Image (cartoon, coloured by chain):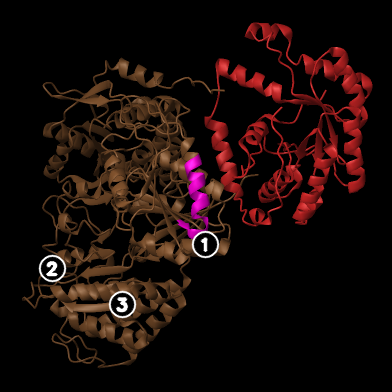
Amino acid sequence: MAGRNPGTELELGWISKVHVNRPAVVRHAEQIKKWRTVKGNWQAAWLLKAVTCIDLTTLSGDDTPSNVHRLCFKAKHPIREDLLKALDMHDKGITVGAVCVYPARVTDAVNALKAAGCNIPVASVAAGFPSGQTPLETKLAEIKLAVEYGAREIDIVISRSLVLTGQWEGLYKEIRQCREACGEAHMKTILATGELGSLANVYKASMIAMMAGKHLYSESQPLQDSAEAIRYTPVSEAEPSETRRSQQCTGGGGQL
Amino acid sequence: MEEGPSPGGAAPAEEWLETHGRALGHFVAGTWLKPPGRGTLQCREAATGRLLATVPRGEETDLAAAVEAAATAATRWGGLGGPRRAQHLQRLAAVLERGAAGVGAVAALLGGRPLSQTLGSDLELGLRLLRAPAGWAQLGPPGLGDWGPLGVVAVVTSGPCSVAALLWKLGALLAMGNAAVVLSPPEVALVPLLVAELSGEGGALPPGVLNVVTGTPGLRRALRAHPRVAAVTFLGLRQEEVQDAVWGSPWQGPRLGVTRGGRVVVIVLESADLDSAAAAIVGSVGTPPALFPWGGCVVLAQEGVATPLERRLRDRLGGLRVGDPLNPGTDVGPLPPMAAPPEGLAQAAREEGAEVFQPPVTLPPGGPFYPPTLLTGVAPASRCLREPAPVLVLLPVRSPGEAVTVTSGLPHVAAGAVWAQDVTLALDTADRLPLGLVWVNALDPLDPTGGGAGAGASLEALREFGRPPWDPPRDVGNRPGTLLELSPEPVPGGPAAAPDIAAAVEAARRVALGWGRLSGAARARVLREAAAALGGAGTAGPPQKDGGDDDDGGDDDDGGDDEDGRLRGALLRWAAHVELMGGAVQEVPGGRALVMRRPLGVVGVAWSGPRPLRRALELLPPALALGNGLVVVAPPSGVGPALRLRQVLVAAGLPGGALTVLPGGAENHGATLARHRPDGLWLCGGGTDPDWASVGSVAHVWVPGGILGGPGQEPPPGAEQELELRCTRPRCLCLPAGGP
């Protein structure tokens, strides 16, 4: 796994100078979509790479041990055997990056993966996912419990209300505390960009998250309907390059 | 992980060249013309120098044949009427769209622009610029209803000329009913030839309407022998090259249209989105814009953000991919043909102590490739600021005001962009820039009309190629003076005025800015008071030599009363105009554009001469009302009335330097005025007007001609609109919007 991001002290100066021009960003994103394409073998290679970065996810109210079990098998063999053979990649150990479930299902996922005999980490959403509107104590307790149950990655979701009301210090403290509650587990921060209101807020929230020590971040908007297929988050100057690469890989997972 | 190659797009172009056996001819009268015994010129691929095809070395007889064919076709084409012509042009656009792959590939092969541009934005822009005039032709352009075609128009191309630029000119001139003769050197020839061949398909254009002749640049001189060529327009030529290709005079020769290319100036203020600005700037540096082909960009960054911006620019420059233009993934192609590599410039900058940053990209071997370059810390007088070149220059400035001042001092600037999220500051800075096209928070250099062939811009293009009803057709030997009111006899000589002109122009320049910035209402008030003074006062001024006063019956043909009355009327009318005049907001794809008219600046009126235009005094109220400063060199018969007009205006509140009247005697001082570089030059002297070579340096040269109407007549309809356009220059402020 990549190295851990220790985070920094809160530097509000970095936030205050942020300006984002939305039409320019949209135009730039469209240019990239249009003219940077991969074809043929390279396309197949990039698609396989994308698969290895996926967190295969099921986050439904009707999750039970049985469908989590099925998910874990799919995590081990995400692509059909005959397709992989045709690409000559059947012996490269192509699996997804992680399996992501609610905390109550973590134990089932861990057991299923152990039975299948593979080392894919289990990621758990936490911190009041998906709305984030729960007290900080329960958020931290949820994280600690998920880690106890065996999750090696924790996907926290930030409090959008803190972003929308501009309480950057509060956001920093909250993410920092979640990070400490994670202990050894890696922490991903879900920004829920569809609810943050503006690209500038997205930028600032991601800066705060990095300062507070997140390892990877995900921009998925759970249950939000987004008009854009690709959200382009302006890359900040302070972002460590490995985080940038991981950012390109992590995306919303497939629902089973 | 690599991205791998993308399938190249050269195939359609190579196929087309093969069908002609790689030896093309001229395209005249709807067929290929391959006169025997001509030398050949070679068309080479820009990136590798490989021979693509040969074209004939055209001679005067070829040109004569083309002009002949165009003239014959023009009479019929002009008589078709707007809607029929519109249909033809739409058909042409459809054919080009179908053949887009071929056109894009040829343009990329020959010119070195990356395929992603030629096939993408260039072609899109070109088709838009072709369809807009077609639309106007269909509807009948407002105010141009009784304008006629000029006849034969020659389009002289050179250097890096893109499809979009070619279609820009062709669309407008064809829509107005003219026939075109395109002269191109071999470096550019394949694109017009392909367009011409496609235009024959499906009857898109009747034969002879679009002709293409290839040859060396020297062939331009052969155009002089063809008085039937009514207008010449240049694409892709530098100013110096234009000067030795023009002939004739504004009075008697062809109309000249020059695309004044140049660089883009980008002003980045403190509240700007630096990432987006850097992305946009670097995006443009790789590919010079379609219509400003010489490329280059000067970035003026406010000091607080200059360093972060520079860091971002360097990062992004490192990510540009330089390579074969036919690879859709390439960002930067080779240098365009006929362009000098900027190595000398970079070296000179290094010696002056500037920092030259070139990212470590691997250039393809062979071929005129040059890495993208960023120059910082340049001296204010450095060569890289004086000459446009495809490099990026970064200068720190202290404030938006300083940015405006620096921009005003840079030569060869075609358009500007202002980046700031503070909307008031952005709009204010954009407003103060002396440029015709300013983007706010965008840098879309592909479009001179700002995000779309806006209605206003295409109308102006149509005017360039149309003949107003008050301007009779110029046949060989017939001077366009029959409708004009010239002095009955040549006037005796008078004192020369050369040294005063310099001082007058200086004074006018100082004052014109302030006068132009006043609100329309303030200027209107001055004009109205002057009108009242003219009407009320009887013998306000000193006794005149030729008696133009109200009191006497007047020895003049039209009588002093009438002259004063007309002046008064003009002052009042233009006062009303300027109060009511407003700009327009146009919705264009990608946002909206504010199209406004701004004063030209300092206009020199060369009125003196052997046969001066009688009523030229009536040209002064519109020019002043619209915020210009004037330097009038008047004939002896006009000095008196002009001075009197000046007196009432100054008494009413006009700043002193805004109108200067100098006696000019019988000589035409047009050339002298032109030497002092006014923003506009009006030639009302008649007869021996200065030729294009001496006045070509001025951007807006105009021969008013019959616009004021004949003796005792009212001005023709449409005259006021024309005057308004002639006294102002367009200013387009582009505000992108959108994104879901």
The earlier-in-sequence mark between 3 and 2 is: 3
Q: Which residue is mark 3?
A: B658
Callout 2: chain: B
Q: Position of residue B474 (x, y in %)?
A: 18, 52
In this view, the residue in front, B732 or B552, is: B732
The circle on residue B427 is 1
Q: Position of residue A170 (x, y in %)?
A: 80, 54
**Chain that is coloured red in the picture:** A
Badge 1 amino acid: Leu
- Total count of labels: 3
Q: Nearer the viewer, mark 1 or mark 3?
A: 1
Residue B677 covered by magenta stretch: no
- Whether residue A62 can be seen here: no
Contact between labelled residues 3 and 1, with CB atoms less than 8 Å apart: no
Residue lying at 22% horizontally and 74% vertically, measured from the top left: B632
Horizontally, is A51 left or right of B33 in the view? Answer: right
Which quarter of the rendered picture does the C terminus of chain B lie within?
top right
Q: Are marks 1 and 3 on the same chain?
A: yes
Contact between labelled residues 2 and 3, with CB atoms less than 8 Å apart: no
The earlier-in-sequence mark between 1 and 3 is: 1
Give the SS element for disc 3: helix
The colour assigned to chain B within the rendered structure? brown
Distance between the Cα atoms at labels 3 and 2?
22 Å
Residue lying at 26% horizontally and 80% vertically, measured from the top left: B563
Which quarter of the rendered picture does the N terminus of chain B lie within?
top right
- Whether residue B300 can be seen here: yes
Badge 2 amino acid: Asn
Give the SS element for disc 2: loop
The circle on residue B668 is 2
Q: Position of residue B328 (x, y in %)?
A: 47, 27
Q: Which residues are magenta?
A: B301-315
